Amino acid sequence: MKAETFQKLLQINRQFYDRFAPSFSVTRGQVQPGVLRLSERFVKEAFILDVGCGNGTLARSLISQGFSGNYLGVDMSEGLLTAAKRLTDETQNAEITFRWADLAVPDWPNQINRENYDWLVSFAVLHHIPGENLRQKTIANFRKLIKPDGRVAVSVWQWQNSARLRKRVLPWSAVGIDPEEVDEGDVLLDWRAGDIPGIRYVHTFSDESLTKLAREAGFKVAEVFYSDGKSGDLALYQVWK
């Protein structure tokens, strides 16, 4: 992928979350079933790193489950982080922290205050990262941030399983990109808050391509399942060790 195209794809999503953070946050008040399924396995005293925490939905869910450990949520959207801090009750037993980090910035792990998390979770994030090279670097950094016996849980969008979302695919001409310059599986999707349109870049993963990415970073895939959406297959989940 050309450097110019790579930067354009990064900018598409940065602009989206800068502009739509408040209205997007309103649509993210509930924990997805797949996320809930995994979060119920976390011990209450665990150290958890949430990469792409958004407006803190997972943190609030953990608190409601009696979580008393250490949670750090990082995200590139200042607007969503502001919502996360506002919506999360500080009067609880857990140590909950939110911090800015952009996975496209090489030193983003320096924003993390420890390197031995029990769980690193990254839900609905990897599909917004353009380019195989950056995806590989991101997963390699994940491995550095967990304990030797730690786990990584990720989810990626399976938008193609939704008839509604298939109608939201936009041509690359909408952002001035030649379709020959993007990777196989890359798409643009229309998102709307009322009648105001937004555009997001998404890379489409298969179970095989996500597994390949994990193995290249030295992980073993411990679990695979599909969840979320009306049909129960709007997201692909994997747990790595």
Image (spheres, rainbow, N blue to C red):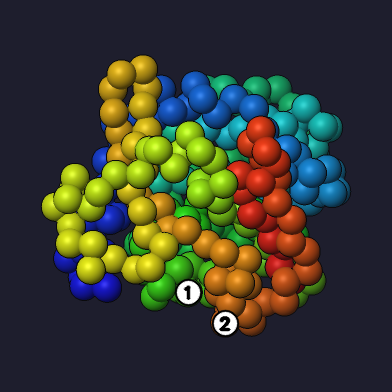
Q: Secondary structure at mark 2?
A: helix
Residue plotted at (18% across, 57% down): 177
Residue plotted at (48% across, 34% down): 164
Where does residue 207 sit, x and y in percent of width and height?
A: 63, 66
| Inter-mark Cα distance, 1 to 2 | 8 Å
Looking at the rendered image, the quarter that the N terminus falls into is bottom left
Q: Nearer the viewer, residue 9 or 192?
A: 192
Residue plotted at (49% across, 21% down): 26
| Residue 65 falls in image quadrant | top right
Looking at the rendered image, the quarter that the C terminus falls into is bottom right
With 197 as the anchor, is 147 left or right in this view?
Answer: right
Where does residue 213 sit, x and y in percent of width and height?
A: 55, 74
Q: In the image, what residue type sits under mark 1?
A: Gln
The image shows residue 154, relative to residue 37, as above or below, that is below
Q: Nearer the viewer, residue 174 or 115?
A: 174
Where does residue 94 sit, x and y in percent of width and height?
A: 74, 36
| Residue 230 falls in image quadrant | top right
Kindly tell me whether residue 155 is visible in this rendering.
Answer: yes
Q: What residue does disc 2 label? A: 216
Q: What residue does disc 1 label? A: 136
Is label 1 in contact with label 2 (beta carbons under 8 Å)?
yes
Q: Secondary structure at mark 1?
A: helix
With 208 as the anchor, is 19 left or right in this view?
Answer: left
Q: In the image, what residue type sits under mark 2?
A: Glu
Q: Nearer the viewer, residue 238 or 22?
A: 238
With 16 as the anchor, is 34 left or right in this view?
Answer: right
Tell which residue pokes out farthest to the left in this image: 176
Where does residue 131 sit, x and y in percent of width and height?
A: 36, 69
Numbered label tally: 2
The image shows residue 37, relative to residue 113, as above or below, that is above
Residue 169, numbered label = none
Kindly tell me whether residue 106 is visible in this rendering.
Answer: no
